[in-house]
Image (cartoon, helix red, strand yellow):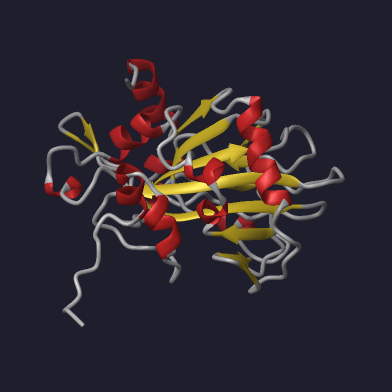
Amino acid sequence: MVSDRDIYFFDLQGFLHLRGALSGNEVAALNDGIDAIPPLESGQWHGSIQAHDYGTNDGLNLQQIYEAGEPFEALIDHPSWYERVRHFVGGEGTFDCYHGPVFIDEAFATLRGPGEAIGVHNGGHLGLMRCQFRVLHGRFHCGQINILIALSDIHEGDGPTMLIPGSHKSNFAHPDYDDFVMAPGRSVDGMEGAIELFMDAGDALLFVDAISHGSAKRTNPAMRRTIVYRYGPSWGSYRHAYRPSPELLARLAPQRRKIVQPVDPVEPPH
């Protein structure tokens, strides 16, 4: 059940901080799963998981992380956020939802060490359909809702996520947007109006992708670990060229399978 409080503050701010979304055991299992993946360079594969980066000193992304085993599969429709995601993506009872409730178009873990960060990106002023925030006749129609999960504590100096509350509704670019926009060596540190979101391991951030967001630069030693699952309407397509593996599809329960592949391919007989 999505509460009136969730609806009000998501509409107002563009994000919700879901404290204690995962248990300690869930966090430990996810960390163990990442530990089981050998060190990779960008472009290298481990099974169905590929290392990837944006070339901006933003750390390493492990794409298709839901392929890493059951603890990651459980995040697909996790009860701490799944009903909220469905509510804010919207489309219930319309063609938006014809093939299934929602769709994960990208799923990855991010490993970010000292000196690494990601600059600001997105904002309501861009008007991107894929990332849009929209409310019509009291119903949400959001193009993309992100769930960012902390697998380690992310406090001062740990490179926390930063965002500008309310910027999902902005009609104009931030006056300093170009100085902080995603590029090599950039972070959101010092951007007027941006706040740091400190998280404990197991917390999750739910936010509309239209909000202006990025991160602070990590200054502490060790590694910041997060997982991001990106949900949109079921008629959307994958952000990258990755596709769920046949092995994953075969072992997923029907609801989870629909979320990672809303439409099964129709092929002629061979």
Q: Residue at x 24, y 59 (%)?
A: 263
Percent of width and height locating residue 147: 49, 40
**Residue closer to the observer: 1 or 156:** 1
Whether residue 7 is visible, yes or no, is yes
Name the residue nearer the viewer: 160 or 74. Answer: 74
**Quadrant of residue 161 in the image?**
top right
Q: Residue at x 43, y 71 (%)?
A: 241
Report the residue that reaches farthest toward the left.
94
- How many numbered dots are placed on residues in this image? 0
What is the quadrant of the N terminus in the image?
A: top left
Q: Position of residue 84 (x, y in %)?
A: 36, 30
Residue at 51% across / 49% down in the picture? 174
Point 69% across, 66% down: residue = 184
Residue 20 at x, y percent in the picture: 58, 23
Say whether residue 98 is left or right of residue 260. left
Asked if residue 163 is positioned above or below residue 35 in the image, the reply reads: above
